């Protein structure tokens, strides 16, 4: 058989949902940004929130900033794939952009808390890969919250008090990475993401590919 006669095989993957959680200040957002910057077929899901923007945050980039009434209206319409109250604010993942990406066989990264992770897992267990980022020490976590210097002292104190409860959720996740060195933590994250993309279940084209292999001579 002449190789050039057969059309090139369509190797469209089944997109995966990469969920990353951690207490505030463990470095999850920087890890997520670097990963989506490196891999063009991984897009960050931009959440909606009722939290006020921090200095430097832009509407539609870090978050879509909504007032409570608008958030509730969207929630009632079923616009959110998941939503949760975190640190007295509401956060939700818009459904539309996620479904569009998945439809193209691309992956979506979610920087969301454990409550959101649980909801997404319940909705699409097989497609979810979840990663929990741990700080190396509680002192490092506190330091990072302070050096970020974007939140008031009360907000930082509240976030620290909540950190323990969030960290307790680590057993729910597929992978746990201790972020004691950013580059090393990033390398781990990138490696697991690449390996997960190659799972047999995420590559439904393989059956047809093998059929074609067998149709070839000899
Ligand atoms: P921050 O206000 O520091 O940006 O985020 C606070 C927490 O809310 C973080 O743990 C972050 O991952 C989480 N978060 C951000 N967006 C969402 C979302 O859409 N859903 C859920 N469940 N959590 C979110």
Image (cartoon, helix red, strand yellow):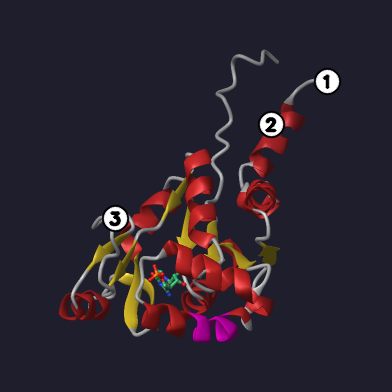
Indicate left or right for 126 with 153 as reference. right
Question: The N terminus appears in which quarter of the rendering?
Answer: top right
Q: Is residue 158 above or below residue 53?
A: below
State which image quarter holds ligand 1. Answer: bottom left
Please tell me whether mark 1 sits on a helix, a strand or a loop.
Answer: loop
Looking at this view, name the residue that lies furthest to the right.
218
Q: Which mark is residue 56?
A: 3
Q: Is residue 22 visible?
A: no
The magenta region covers 160-166
Location of mark 1 (residue): 218
Dot 3 lies on which element? loop
Name the N-terminal-most of marks 1 and 3: 3
Going from N to C along the chain, the mark reached first, 3 or 2, is 3
Identify which residue, 78 or 146, lies in the foreground: 146
Q: Residue 204 carries which label?
A: none
As measured in the structure, the alpha-carbon distance from the residue carrying label 1 to the one carrying label 3 is: 63 Å
Residue at 68% across, 63% down: 177
The Cα–Cα distance between marks 2 and 1, rounded to whole angstroms, is 12 Å
Chief SS of the magenta region: helix
Q: Nearest to the eye among marks 3 and 2: give it.
A: 3
The residue tagged 2 is 212
- Say if residue 173 shows up in the picture: yes
Residue 160, position as x, y percentages in the image: 51, 81
- Residue 45 lies, in percent from the top left, at 40, 58
- Residue at mark 2: C-beta within 8 A of ligand 1: no
Q: Relative to residue 123, is residue 182 depicted above or below?
A: above
> Count the marks: how many?
3
Badge 2: few (under 14), some or many (20 or more) residues near its Cα, within 10 Å? few
The residue sitting at 67% across, 47% down in the picture is 187
Magenta highlight on residue 130 = no
Q: Position of residue 62 (x, y in %)?
A: 33, 57
Height in image: 9 above or below 97? above
């Amino acid at each position: 058989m002449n190789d050039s006669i057969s059309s090139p095989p369509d190797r469209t993957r089944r997109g995966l949902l990469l969920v990353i959680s951690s207490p505030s200040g463990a470095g999850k957002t920087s890890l997520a940004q670097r990963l989506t910057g490196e891999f063009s077929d991984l897009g960050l899901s931009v959440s909606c929130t009722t939290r006020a923007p921090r200095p430097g945050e832009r509407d539609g980039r870090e978050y879509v900033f909504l007032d409570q009434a608008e958030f509730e209206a969207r929630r009632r319409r079923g616009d959110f794939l998941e939503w949760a109250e975190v640190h007295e604010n509401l956060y939700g993942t818009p459904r539309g952009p996620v479904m569009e990406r998945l439809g193209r066989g691309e992956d979506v990264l979610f920087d969301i808390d454990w409550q959101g992770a649980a909801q997404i897992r319940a909705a699409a267990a097989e497609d979810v890969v979840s990663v929990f980022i741990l700080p190396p020490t509680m002192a490092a976590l506190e330091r990072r919250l302070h050096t970020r210097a974007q939140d008031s002292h009360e907000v930082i104190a509240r976030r620290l008090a909540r950190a323990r409860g969030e960290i307790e959720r680590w057993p729910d996740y597929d992978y746990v990475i201790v972020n004691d060195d950013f580059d090393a933590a990033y390398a781990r994250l990138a490696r697991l993401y690449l390996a997960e993309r190659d799972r047999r279940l995420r590559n439904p084209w393989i059956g047809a590919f093998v059929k074609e292999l067998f149709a070839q001579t000899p």
